Image (tube, grey):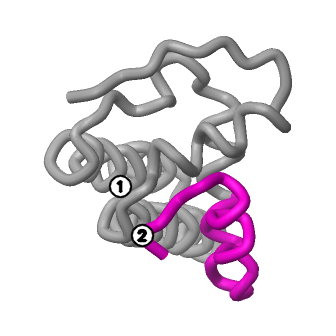
Amino acid sequence: MTNRPREHQSFETFWPYYLQEHSKRATRNFHYVGTSLVVGIAIYAIVTTNWWLMLAMPLAGYFFAWLSHWRIERNRPATFTYPLWSLYADFKMWGMWLSGRLKPELQKAGVEDI
C-alpha cells in the first residue's frame, strides 16, 4: 500500500489529490456502486419512512470504497485523514461521472486511467 502524506488547507487542493488517490478506473467504479447504493437507500428510506435503513448507508458506501482501496488501488482511503472532504469529493466525483464531466478533471489531476 502506498500513502503519500500531504497537508491540504482547502478543498481546491484536496480535490486533485483525491482524484489521484482514485487513479484506477476500477477503484472509481467501485465507488460509483457504493455511492449509488447510498443514494438508493436514502431515497427508499424516505419513500417508505423506514428510517432504520439509513444505518445501511455508511455500510454500503464504505464497503465498496474501502474494498477498492485495499484490493485495487492499494492505498489508504483519504477518508481516514480527510473525512468530510472525502465524503464531499466522493459525491462530487459520482455526480461528475453521471453527468459526463469527470474526464477533464481526471486529466487536470494527472490521472491516466480514464
In this view, the residue in front, 107 or 74, is: 107
**Which three-letter amino acid code belongs to the residue tagged 2?**
Asp
Region in magenta? 92-114
Distance, label 2 to label 1, CA atoms, is 25 Å
Residue 68, position in %: x, y? 26, 52
Q: Which of the two labelled residues, at mark 2 and mark 1, occupies the earlier sequence position? A: 1
Look at the numbered disc 1 and give the secondary structure of its residue.
helix
Give neighbour class at mark 1: few <14, some 14-19, many 20+ (Cα, 10 Å): some
**Rendered location of residue 40, percent (x, y):** 52, 74
Q: Is residue 106 visible?
A: yes
Say left or right for 63 vs 39: left
Residue depicted at 62% across the width and 41% down the height: 87
Name the mark on residue 73: none
Question: Which quarter of the picture shows residue 101?
Answer: bottom right
Q: Which residue is mark 1?
A: 60
Mark closer to the observer (2, 1) = 2
Residue 52 shown left or right of residue 99 in the figure: left
The residue drawn where x is 60% and y is 52% is 90
Q: Looking at the picture, how far across and down is residue 105, in whole percent?
A: 72, 64
Which of the two residues, 40 or 108, is positioned nearer the viewer here?
Answer: 108
- Which amino acid, by three-letter code, is at mark 1? Ala
The answer to whether marks 2 and 1 mark residues whose Cβ atoms lie closer than 8 Å is no
Q: Which mark is residue 113?
A: 2
Q: Main secondary structure of the magenta part?
A: helix
For the point 37% across and 44% down, the residue is 62
Tell me the element at label 2: loop
Coordinates of residue 54 in the picture (x, y in percent)? 50, 50
Q: Looking at the picture, does residue 62 appear above or below residue 105?
A: above
Determine if residue 37 is in view: no
